[in-house]
Amino acid sequence: MNSLDALRLMVDHFPGGRPVMAVRLGLELDPKGECEVLRKELSGSASHKLGVIRAHQISEICMDAKSPHCYAYVNTVCGSAGRMLELPVREMTEPVSMQRSTSDVIREMSDVVTMSLESGNQSMSDNEAARQLKEVHEAYAALQRHEQNIRAANAAGKPAHVRAVA
């Protein structure tokens, strides 16, 4: 997943979608309630470049709203630098499912291992490296969701006054 893919994912899952995001960014909506500028920027159109400032604004708006996939962009940026973002504990928008998050981690790690074994120790093309890094980033995201579920399940078993301190 590249940073543009991450931003598209974030905007598509933002409550209200692209029209609401466009309004939050101060962009004009057309009579149909859509924003061509944002659509073209997110599509990677050569005529409408998505700048780092707009990308940062989208990221901040999504993180403030705690929308699904709100950390996708910063994870992609960190991942391309060989790092992993430590996510803060935040309220879960969906119920905790340890079985689901565990199976997501296993599935994503299986994809990483399978692709690595297929390529062997040979040199690889830029496209192959990009595909494998995409799988690694998806595994990071699955691990982070699982970590959030662990923390939420742990907090659920504690009295409210203890939860507030942790």
Image (cartoon, rainbow, N blue to C red):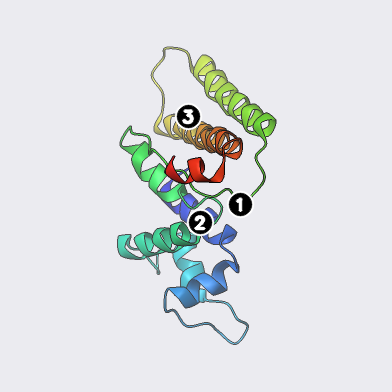
| Residue designated by label 2 | 66
- How far apart are labels 3 and 1 at the CA level? 29 Å
Q: Residue 8 in the image: x percent, y percent?
A: 51, 57
Q: Residue 35 in the image: x percent, y percent?
A: 52, 76
Amino acid beneath label 1: Thr
Camera-near label (3 vs 1) is 1
10 Å crowding of disc 1: few (<14), some (14-19), many (20+): few
Q: Residue 41 in the image: x percent, y percent?
A: 44, 65
79 in relation to 93, above or below: above
Give the residue displayed 47% in from the left and 56% down from the top: 7
Relative to the observer, which residue lies in front, 57 or 165?
Answer: 165
53 in relation to 110, above or below: below
Question: Which of the 4 image quarters holds residue 111?
Answer: top right
Amino acid beneath label 2: Lys
Give the residue displayed 50% in from the left and 45% down from the top: 161
Left or right of 55? Residue 162 is right
Amino acid beneath label 3: Gln
Relative to the observer, which residue lies in front, 16 or 82?
Answer: 16
39 in relation to 72, above or below: below
- How far apart are labels 1 and 2 at the CA level? 8 Å
Give the residue displayed 55% in from the left and 84% down from the top: 30
- Decide which of tag 1 and tag 2 comes sooner along the chain: 2
Mark linked to residue 93: 1
Residue found farthest to the bottom: 31
Secondary structure beneath dot 1 equals: loop
| Residue designated by label 3 | 132
- How far apart are labels 2 and 3 at the CA level? 28 Å
